[in-house]
Amino acid sequence: MMQHELFAEPREPLAEGAVLLRGFCAREVESLLRELDSVTAPAPFRHMITPGGYRMSVAMTNCGPLGWVSDASGYRYSGTDPVSGAPWPAMPEGFVRLAQAAAAAAGFPAFAPDACLVNRYEPGAKLSLHQDKDEKDFRAPIVSVSLGLPATFLFGGQRRKDPVRRFRLVTGDVVVWGGPARLTYHGVSPLADGEDTLTGRYRINLTFRKAG
Ligand code: MD6
Ligand code: FE
């Protein structure tokens, strides 16, 4: 069998401005998860409520100066955790280093994220097709890191009705998108059950943004 049938290319372009870096942080997964504990101790995962009144199946928390929050009044970025009233925990050093290295590898040097949204999926949890458009400046890319159980990432187009492609994301994969792909519709299919040696029955996703 030819090599290309056994091993996926580590750098897979998804669209202009969007690239999947397979295994980019595969050797750091354990240390990233350890650093994540310093975030979830003061700011535990919680299920936010959508503006329409639904409880999100994905549990979320944040670190860094700004955090993404949703409640009955809408989606927005906030400097404080609405549960504790305190500022979000600092972004761990390993998170910042990884986000900058991945952005640079994708052609976006000098990425300075001020927000890291942490998503936790359990089997059955999903994220419906959406655009990330709550950030002030769409010139900065988004860096998305997958840890734990594998997921099917949905990648559409610039309009909700555009056709959607599916990509399998496994632990250690990083997706970077910006430029002309920055407002692409995307989502995550319901998580399949499984067992990861480090996260158990969860998938964790870190998304780094320049929000403010
Ligand atoms: C996830 N990711 O992978 C959800 N958004 O769990 C996102 O919603 C996302 O991966 C913007 C850019 C990259 C992403
Ligand atoms: Fe998103």
Image: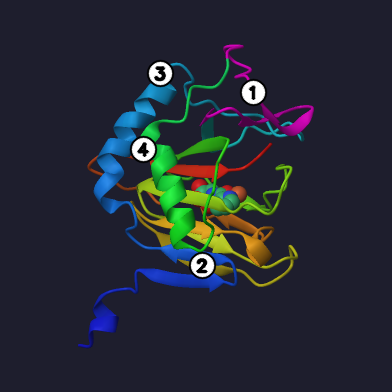
Question: What residue is pinned by disc 3?
Answer: 41
Magenta region: 62-86
What residue do we see at 62% from left, 19% from top?
A: 80
Question: What residue is pinned by disc 4?
Answer: 94
Q: Earlier in the sequence, mark 4 or mark 1?
A: 1
Question: What residue is pinned by disc 1?
Answer: 79
Mark 2 or 3, which is nearer the eye? 3
Residue contact at pointers 2 and 3, CB within 8 angstroms:
no
Q: Earlier in the sequence, mark 2 or mark 4?
A: 4
Question: What residue is pinned by disc 2?
Answer: 166
Q: Locate residue 55, reporting x and y percent.
A: 63, 32
Q: Is residue 75 magenta?
A: yes
Mark 2 or 4, which is nearer the eye? 4
In this view, 34 is above or below 21: above
Q: Earlier in the sequence, mark 3 or mark 4?
A: 3
Q: Quadrant of residue 212?
A: top right
Callout 3: SS:
loop
Residue 195 visible in the snapshot: no
What residue do we see at 33% from left, 38% from top?
A: 32
The residue sitting at the front extreme is 110
Mark 2 to mark 4 CA distance (whole Å): 29 Å
Mark 3 or 4, which is nearer the eye? 4
The residue sitting at the top extreme is 85
Mark 3 or 1, which is nearer the eye? 1
Q: Is residue 5 left or right of residue 79?
A: left
